[in-house]
Image (cartoon, rainbow, N blue to C red):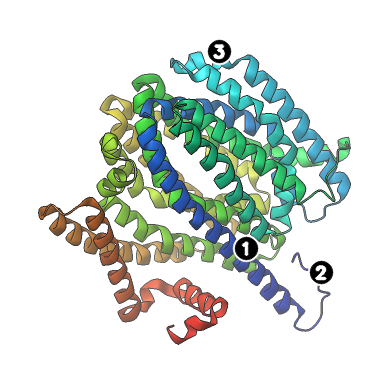
Amino acid sequence: MSSDQTPPGPGRKQEREKSLTHRTVDGFLWSAGGNAVQVVLRMLVLAVLARLIDPASFGIVSAALIAISLLEVMGQVGTSQAIIQRLELNKRDIHTAMSFTVVTSLLMGGLLYLFAPEIAALFGMEGVAPAIQLLALAFPIRGFSVVSEALLQRWMQFHRLAGITLASYVFGYALIALTLAHMGWGVFALIYGQIVQTIILSLCHIFFTRHVFGLGFDWKILRGMLVFSGGVSLSRFANFFAMNADNFIVGRMLGAEALGFYSRAFNFMIMPVGLLGNALDIVLYPAMSSIQNDEERLRRAYLRAVSLIALTVMPLSAVMVVLGQEMILIVLGGNWTEAVVPFQILSACLLFRIGYKANTILARAKGAVYRSAWRQWLFAILVAVGAWGGHFWGISGVASGVGFALAAQFLMMLNFGRSLTLASLGELASIHLRHLTIAVLAGGGTYASATFLRAQDAPHLIVLVAGGISAGVVLLTLAILAPRLYGEEGAWVLGTVAEKLPAAKRFL
């Protein structure tokens, strides 16, 4: 069912499909564009903070954020996802969801503040309890805006979401964290940056949905939401444990400094495409939800999402593995050499980390949240086992164990996505084999260039730039000589660029 209100009739279905496609593409461009700017800013901010704040302080904040993330999942209970997925929505639904998230967020924030010392004791690290208590103060504020953010996503107001996210990062985290770090506040610079960013983000979401903002309660509505939200929450809990089990094990077994190295390696690896994954989630979920009963359109949307992820992520992954040393040393500095190997290992698993998102988005759009949840829990167990087994070999061993878990999760969810659509295993295998070929060739070109320049003792920046140019030359050559490798998704991207940027038609 389309989200458009065009009445049925000759040619109307094609018009509705075109309208939804255009809105989805526009939304993705807004989200991806805003995220691209944010990636650059985050790298610049991280480069400065890494030179002003020691790795142990980053480890303390990473540990505190584990507790915050868990309580955030418990406080929201998936109601925001229910708001997006519902085909029909009224103010009573909105007010009930808002009231529920406000109450649960207040409760969870209070519990987090009171039990911070006990939670911190699980990590066995000094300084975690005060960090948790400070971050807990902003927790209830976020509860007031969760549903507002979901409404902007449902209404496909992606330009506003992109602007809000960027503004909150610049005037919240970046401005506050950099200023306080320069003044020597250490770990508290990171904490207050997080708090101010959360406050700005929440207030902006509320401002742009103020015409429907309100509190109210209807038990029947809430009960209906919780049926769907329960499955979402089970998946989110599993995802939380999967994404934080390795950090907990590193912090508990190897200490704050090791956690600082590992968490920065992971966050730096995920930063460029993690924001791409978030953009896909924000845009594809409402789009897929609106066509959840149209099997053929849903199949095409799913295959295109899988293809675009492979097209983007696989070559980038190969380049990041080859140039991992230069990337870490340039951005973080010479004190972070221990993060290089974990970064390269995790970069090799980039497709697995991002690729499964298309399948989880599809599962939520189709309402198959409980079938997705048990797979997420199995993934969480695999991460915990892999990270624990790997910690005997340090943070590189943890990264390897997590990599195996990510690969297993990717294959499992890819098969699940196939079962929810009319897509075949042959189609999915063909997509990934084509882009694996491209990635190997791009990575080979980068490796040849980097190896030569390293032998000449070239500066890290020269090696990085030359390696990136080499990969770009290979990708462009393949597009000219072997365009079939890029498939239908490559042609679609070029066509979309030509449509959105008329001046580009002369070159495409």
The residue that mark 3 highlights is 118
Q: Residue sitting at 55 percent across and 12 percent down?
A: 118
Residues at discs 3 and 1 in contact (Cβ within 8 Å): no
Query: Closest to the observer: 449 or 86?
Result: 449
Q: Left or right? Give the position of 295 relative to 261.
A: right
Q: Earlier in the sequence, mark 3 or mark 2?
A: 2
Q: Residue sitting at 60 percent across and 33 percent down?
A: 195
The residue that mark 2 highlights is 5
- Residue type at mark 2 is Gln
Residues at discs 1 and 2 in contact (Cβ within 8 Å): no
Q: Is residue 466 above or below residue 325?
A: below
The residue that mark 1 highlights is 27
Secondary element at image label 1: helix
Q: Earlier in the sequence, mark 1 or mark 2?
A: 2
Q: Residue sitting at 74 percent across and 44 percent down?
A: 147
Q: Residue sitting at 34 percent across and 27 percent down?
A: 258
Q: Left or right? Give the position of 464 relative to 114.
A: left
Secondary element at image label 2: loop
Where residue 36 appears, x then y in whole percent?
49, 57
Where residue 64 appears, x then y in whole percent?
52, 25
Dot 2 alpha-carbon crowd within 10 angstroms: few under 14, some 14 to 19, many 20 or more: few
Q: Quadrant of the N terminus?
A: bottom right
